[in-house]
Image (cartoon, helix red, strand yellow):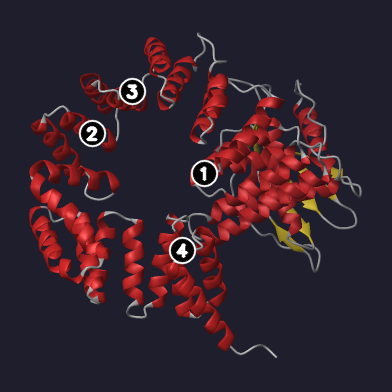
Amino acid sequence: MSTRPVVAVVPFGARGATPRAGAIARQIARRLVDRFARETTLELRPVFLLAMPEAASDAGYLVFGSSPEPELAAQYASSSGATHALTATYRDGPSRALDVALVDASTKAATRVAIAIPEGALQRVEGDLATWLVKALGVEVAADLGSPPTANEAAYVALLEAMDEEVNATLLRPSDAARARESLRRALSGFIDAARGDPASEAPEERLLVVAAESLERGEIADEVRALEELVTIRPRSWRAHYILGQLRAEGGDLNGAIVATEHAHALKPLSDADVVRLAELYANAGAPAPALAHLKRVRDGSDAYGAAQELLAIISLQRGDLDAGRAAFDRAVSAGTTSWELHASFGAAVHSRGALDDAIAHYVDALGAGGPPVVRLNLARVLLAKGDHAAALRELDALLASERSGEVAMHALRLRFGIREPELERELERAGKAALSGDPAALDPARAVFDRALAREPALWEAHFGLGIVARQRGDAKVAQSAFRRVLELLPDQPDALHELGVALLMENDFTEALEALDHAAALRPDEPAYVADAGFAHLRAGDLANARARLERAARLDANDPITKSYLGELARVESERPKPS
């Protein structure tokens, strides 16, 4: 049986005039456990307790935490398999001190000490406690456990209070997400205050980076990104802060920001080859293949990341149209034993564009075998169709549509299957769609008949539902138009044309709230389409929101200064503005 001391650290209690004392006491205990994390001659284990209030011995004092008597402390130690228990009470006020008791679990005997805390020297208390504990246990340690974590008390208190808010956020998260998030914001702010109070201290950075890394799992990163952006201004030489900031920005879709942060980290400390590949992928996704390729070519054969580097190099080469370079990199990736569905799919697309249909089919089949998504099966069906194998193409489309019933891939597959099964009706559908949009009243009835026939063959054909909506809107039937466009959005969420047309149909019935939502959404999806931006502006005008109306209509005019509809909307806006009473 090992004779190594194992100390159960009970969350320290506190006597003080404010709740701050409780936070300080609890987190000194927590930090003490962290100080001994790498030691081998003894072990500290935290004891997790709910707050246990005591009777105050001094009138007007508040009491926090737990300071159990030796017998109860010994029970805590025994129940956690420890040889000793460490308890303490932090006394705040004019004569600050930490009253400490080290209790032997077997004898229940307590060794006590009062560690005085001079004014402005709270940051030294955990080091003083660690030094005393080592001597009391009669062990030797390799590390210097007595150094303070910050250079001044203000930074240390900010650190402890932030750590306590971090714990609050963890406890609140399962039951009250809003309050948990607020506690986490206070924790992040506290860590930044601590770092600003002592820029040389690594302790605030350590906690902030842990919180930021955990946020990647939760998907809530906005506050953490802002905190890290402040941290790197305080500690610009911290490669870890830049590195985690890059990860968070990438998670949030800020590719350029992620590249900048990751390159800063790389300049401060060379990244691992795996991280270099991820950096190259950021460049590739941001539309910058040249720096991506430059990074990938630095990953040498023999590296664990070599196969991944060659795979990405092959994909980028294919996207640039360099099939020879892509093929060479593909062969190197295969030799390294790393070929993903993305690589096979990219090769399938590349060789398909050059007419090598059998080769494309083989790559798409390999991509599906490697776990490729439904879009791979859709592309396989397209190649089979191009080869003239309609039966095989239909089998692939049927397999895809058995699991995918909505969304862009499913709708493309549905239309492709419809064209194979009903080639003549598909041509009629194309002509009917153009006729409905032409605005010719004589074309509406024949177009509607085609849409109805198409839906009788394929009820989920979104283009036919869209056509029915156009016909209904042209005839002034807002309710039927809305129903048709809503059906399109069920099949193909966020389809910009359907959102735009739904908004127009809602405006026909003065339903401003939903119309604004639909038209603004459509304009956001098509920000360079002047008609979409102008119609969104007109909706705001109809709703009486003149400021937003002007912003959108002026943007539409910049996109197309000669559009007559935008000009008429701006004229109407000017009229309404002129009639609105001026503030006195």
Q: Secondary structure at mark 3?
A: helix
- Disc 3 marks a residue whose amino acid type is Phe
Q: Nearer the viewer, residue 245 or 576?
A: 576
Residue at mark 3: 347
Task: Return the residue at label 1.
Answer: 253
Residue depicted at 36% across the width and 64% down the height:
500
Which of the two marks, 2 or 3, is nearer to us in this view? 3
Q: Earlier in the sequence, mark 1 or mark 3?
A: 1
Kindly identify the amino acid type of the residue bearing the numbered disc 4: Val
Q: Nearer the observer, disc 3 or disc 4? A: 4
* Secondary-structure class at tag 2: helix
Q: In this orientation, which residue lies closer to the viewer: 412 or 311?
A: 412
Going from the N terminus, do you reach mark 4 or mark 2 first? 2
The kind of residue tagged 2 is Arg
Q: CA distance from mark 1 to mark 3?
A: 26 Å
Q: How far from the left and from the top, in percent, is residue 385? A: 16, 32
Q: CA distance from mark 4 to mark 2?
A: 36 Å
How far apart are the two marked residues, 1 and 4, measured between alpha carbons? Answer: 24 Å
Q: Residues within 10 Å of mark 3 (few under 14, many from 20)?
A: many
- Mark 2 packing: few (<14 Cα in 10 Å), some, or many (20+)? many
- Contact between labelled residues 2 and 4, with CB atoms less than 8 Å apart: no
Q: Residue shown at 48%/77% (left/top)?
A: 541
SS for dot 4: helix
Q: Which residue is mark 2?
A: 377
Report the residue marked by disc 4.
533
- Mark toward the start of the polypeptide (2 vs 1): 1
Of marks 4 and 2, the one in the foreground: 4
At label 1, the amino acid type is Gly
- Residue 370, located in which quarter of the rendered image? top left
